[in-house]
Image (cartoon, helix red, strand yellow):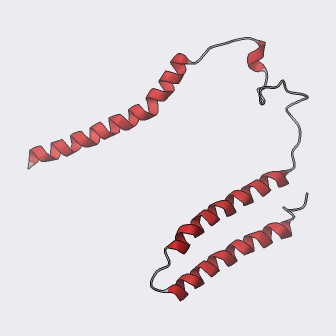
Amino acid sequence: MPGHLHLDYFFVFVFLLVGFAFAVVPIVVAYLISPRSTGLKKLVSYESGMMPIGQAWIQFGVAYYLFALIFLAFDVDVLYLFPVLLAFGDFPWRDLIEIAIFVVILSLAIVYAWVKGVFEW
């Protein structure tokens, strides 16, 4: 079976080549067909198709970012809960206790953020 082993390596090599092509070809094509412009307009910030007003270096409250990160974390956790609830198994009490522990841990994260003042504007 020595010939069979070389065939397996060939398929791995082809797979790696195709993966590399999928990663590199879009970058090369975008570089080749993208417009190249120079001048002052290239240095201006693009913001929703409108000319920017004022300076770009203004201070934002960190609470906005923390609020967004907490929202994202809970959004992902809720997405996790749906398949878990649909896959209730042969041990419904154990599953219910595990989900309750998960929700309590999430609630502790909300309480922690509340104590730290993340929800105060």
For image coordinates 74% across by 74% down, the residue present is 108
Q: Residue furthest bottom?
A: 93
Q: Residue furthest left?
A: 1
For image coordinates 70% across by 11% down, the residue present is 38
**x and y, in percent, of residue 73 in the image:** 67, 61
Location of residue 15 by image quarter = top left
Closest to the observer, 66 or 94: 94
**x and y, in percent, of residue 1 in the image:** 8, 50
Q: Give left or right: position of 92 versus 109.
A: left
For image coordinates 67% across by 60% down, the residue present is 75
Closest to the observer, 82 or 55: 82
Q: Give left or right: position of 28 versus 106.
A: left
Q: Give left or right: position of 10 versus 59.
A: left
96 over 56 or under it: above or below: below
28 over 71 or under it: above or below: above
Closest to the observer, 89 or 100: 89
Q: How many marks?
A: 0
**x and y, in percent, of residue 74 in the image:** 68, 63
Q: Residue furthest front?
A: 86
For image coordinates 49% across by 74% down, the residue present is 87
Location of residue 121 by image quarter = bottom right
